[in-house]
Every structure is written in structure tokens, then in C-alpha cells.
């Protein structure tokens, strides 16, 4: 006997975002995608499933990855793609990669949101996929070295990536949100924010 799906607390298949409106998880409308909600959510999502030695947000990871790309001379669309490469997680949450690999349904939902985010901000994630991968992977290795320097376990692919010196700030959510929004305002046309980069 199959069990009925428990929809208690749901409003169809939507989520309420920090800006106050609802976003459809099955068919996200690009007009429902907004930078303040992305920044607010990513600033509160901890990387590595929360198993970091200190709180370390997806927002901080994204800002550092973008700063790394700036330092290597990338500009414009490439930087926007790097900054927003994890923006879908603001709507569907983060999932540790080994688990994500076993759940192709998550990948499909993620791609749906990436398409909506790409349309909303005029970002071509596909075109810049190699650049995104380069800096995302560089940050992953830098984070592992910074957070777990004593760990001698070999993470897949790390031998092919040079070591980078990145100073992680372990920003609290309010600071991570401000820094993400500030970076976005520098890169995304039409975005305004009065906060300061800290």
C-alpha cells in the first residue's frame, strides 16, 4: 500500500523566498529570481554540508572564486558566471557532491534553476562552464587545505590543480550577504546596493 504524499505546509510546489514572494520549484519564472533573495540565502548556507570547522557560506565561496578570476584578468560575463555559479542553491539548497552524484533528479532541478537564473541576469553558464569549473575547483582545493590542513586523504583530481593561497574570512551571514551583493552590484547591470564591502 502506497503512502500518501504529505503536503502539510506547502503552497503547491513553491517556496517563499526572503524577498517575500513565492518561486515555483517545477517551473521557475526568471521574473521571480532576484539578487537580494540569492544573496540572503547563500549567505546562510554552509558549505560541505555544515561540516566545516567554522561556518563558511556558499556566498563567501562565490565571492572568493570571483576575486580569484578578477586577479587572473577575467572580466564581464565570465565574472558574472563565476559569481552566480551556485545561485541555484539559494532556491533548492546545497547537497554534498557524493550524494548529488547518486540523485540525478536533483541535477535536473538544479539545471532548471540555472536556466531561469541565466535568463534573469543574462548570464551564459554554458559558455563559461570551463571558467566556472576552473575557479570552483581551485576554491575547493584551497578550502580543503585551509580548513583541514592535517587531512592526508587524496581528494579526486586535486593533483591536477595548483595550490592557491586564499584567506578565508569565515564571514557571518550578514557580512557574507553584504559582500556578495556588493560584488554583484559591481558586475551585474541594473543592480544597486548601498552596503559596503567588508
Image (tube, helix red, strand yellow):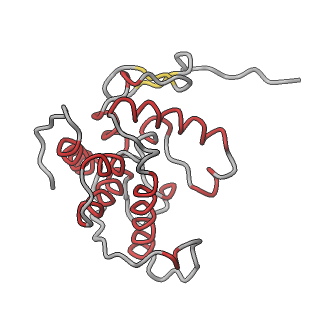
- What residue lies at 26% left-to-right and 45% top-to-bottom? 177
Residue sticking out furthest to the right: 1
Residue 64 sits in quarter? bottom left
In the rendered view, tell whether residue 136 sits above or below residue 19: below
In the rendered view, tell whether residue 67 sits above or below residue 13: below
x, y (%) of residue 190?
18, 31
Residue 40 sits in quarter? top left
x, y (%) of residue 132?
41, 55
In-image side of 78 versus 189 (left or right): right
Query: In the picture, which quadrant includes the N terminus?
Result: top right
Camera-side residue: 41 or 74? Answer: 74
x, y (%) of residue 94?
50, 47
In-image side of 182 versus 123 (left or right): left
- What residue lies at 45% left-to-right and 56% top-to-bottom? 47
Camera-side residue: 113 or 92? Answer: 113
- What residue lies at 31% left-to-right and 41% top-to-bottom? 39
Query: In the picture, which quadrant includes the C terminus?
Result: bottom left
Residue sticking out furthest to the front: 127
x, y (%) of residue 57?
37, 53
Camera-side residue: 37 or 173? Answer: 37
In-image side of 182 versus 6 (left or right): left
Amino acid at each position: 500500500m502506497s503512502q500518501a504524499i504529505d503536503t502539510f505546509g506547502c503552497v503547491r510546489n513553491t517556496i517563499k523566498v526572503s524577498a517575500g514572494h513565492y518561486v515555483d520549484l517545477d517551473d521557475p519564472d526568471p521574473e521571480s529570481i532576484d539578487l537580494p533573495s540569492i544573496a540572503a540565502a547563500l549567505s546562510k548556507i554552509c558549505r560541505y554540508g555544515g561540516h566545516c570547522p567554522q561556518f563558511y557560506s556558499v556566498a563567501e565561496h562565490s565571492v572568493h572564486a570571483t576575486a580569484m578570476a578578477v586577479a587572473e584578468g577575467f572580466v564581464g560575463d565570465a565574472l558574472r558566471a563565476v559569481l552566480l555559479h551556485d545561485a541555484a542553491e539559494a532556491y533548492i539548497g546545497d547537497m554534498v557532491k557524493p550524494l548529488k552524484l547518486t540523485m540525478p533528479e536533483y541535477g535536473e532541478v538544479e539545471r532548471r534553476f540555472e536556466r531561469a537564473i541565466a535568463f534573469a541576469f543574462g548570464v551564459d553558464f554554458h559558455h563559461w562552464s570551463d571558467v566556472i569549473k576552473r575557479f570552483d575547483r581551485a576554491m575547493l582545493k584551497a578550502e580543503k587545505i585551509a580548513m583541514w590542513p592535517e587531512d592526508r586523504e587524496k581528494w579526486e583530481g586535486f593533483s591536477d590543480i595548483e595550490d592557491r593561497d586564499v584567506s578565508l574570512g569565515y564571514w557571518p551571514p550578514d557580512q557574507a550577504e553584504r559582500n556578495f551583493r556588493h560584488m554583484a552590484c559591481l558586475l551585474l547591470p541594473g543592480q544597486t546596493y548601498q552596503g559596503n564591502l567588508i
